Amino acid sequence: MIPTYFIRKPGAVAVTMLLYVGTSHAQGVAGAARESRAKQQLETGRNVLTNKDAPAPIPAATPPSSSPQPAPPQPAHSAAAPARHEIPYDPYEGSAQRVIINVTLNGKVQARLAVDTGAPQTVIFGALAERLGLLNETSAGVWTRAGGIGGSTPAIRTIIETIRVGDIEQQFFPTTIVPELSSAFEGLIGMDFLSLFVMHIEPPRRLMILEDVPPASIVYGQRNERWWRSNFKEFAILRRGWHDYAERLKKAIDSSNIAAGGEIDDARLMLDFARRQDLEAQRLFDQLNNRAIRYVVPMNWREY
């Protein structure tokens, strides 16, 4: 949602706040990540990931010393067992026992994501978003806020086209970009990916096991009604919010008696940012809608 100060009549305080958020929103998120890493490096003297460094791969899990017992033979009439995928993980982040796995995003960028069954959607940090090319002059996502147990924080909404874990690749993930939370991983892989499988963890072997689940329907791109409705609703709200704000701001500028000076110049910068956000929100909405068309998603699941 657009912060409340975005929809007030432009004034000195609102201008200052919006310019801070608007003209440097992408750089601010990524900058926070870089500053955090730099501080940790100075304090501990250890190397951390940079925007240009590919994360170190997780070593393959060492099998137990004892020989595994062979699986019992399956009856000839039984159904085939679901495909089983063994994903090595790193269980350490300081004293925390997080499950951190290697993933490949958009078919080209390797990253370390923490498995989080409490996260409804995938989350990535600003530095990783930069490596993916999601924060640049032509594509900067849509400014919003992300909420959690500790409150809300400024965030950017975007879309990751593919997530690959081991030999599994899934498509199309609306994603939130937030400031860095830890140097041990670069984001969270949430239930939008994990819910497509039966998952369990084997700590002795440091493996995350994913078993395929037959999709309820391949017509809707393996996504259920709730997924489609919630994403359409969110993207429609973002699109309407930024469009309406830009229109109100333009009317305020047109009706102003101030022809020049700092206040009107600031308001015009705000309008330029709002228009760019309007275009970004429309672009994200179109990506979602094009996918809905491709998978013949019912019209009453879509909000425009």
Image (tube, helix red, strand yellow):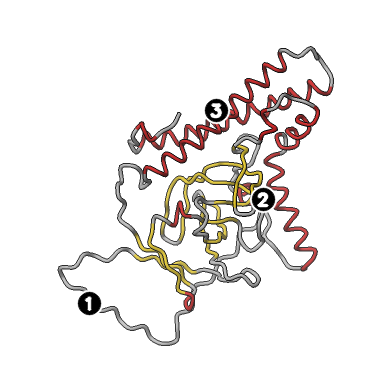
Residue 32 x/y as whole percent: 72, 50
The residue beneath circle 2 is: 179
Q: Which of 298 and 108 is in front in this view?
A: 298
In-image side of 171 versus 24 (left or right)? left
Q: Are marks 1 and 2 in contact (CB under 8 Å)?
A: no
Residue 82 x/y as whole percent: 30, 63
Say which mark, if any, is on residue 240.
3
Q: Nearer the viewer, residue 263 or 47?
A: 263
Q: Quadrant of the N terminus?
A: top right
Label 2 residue SS? loop
Residue 112 x/y as whole percent: 57, 60
The residue beneath circle 1 is: 73
Say which mark, if any, is on residue 30.
none
**Residue 17's image quarter?**
top right
Residue 227 x/y as whole percent: 42, 44
Sequence order check, earlier mark of 1 and 3: 1
Sequence order check, earlier mark of 3 and 2: 2
Tell me which amino acid carries mark 2: Pro
Q: Quadrant of the C terminus?
A: top left
Q: Residues within 10 Å of mark 2 (few under 14, many from 20)?
A: many
Residue at the outermost left position? 77
Tell me which amino acid carries mark 1: Pro
In-image side of 122 versus 186 (left or right)? left
Tell me which amino acid carries mark 3: Arg
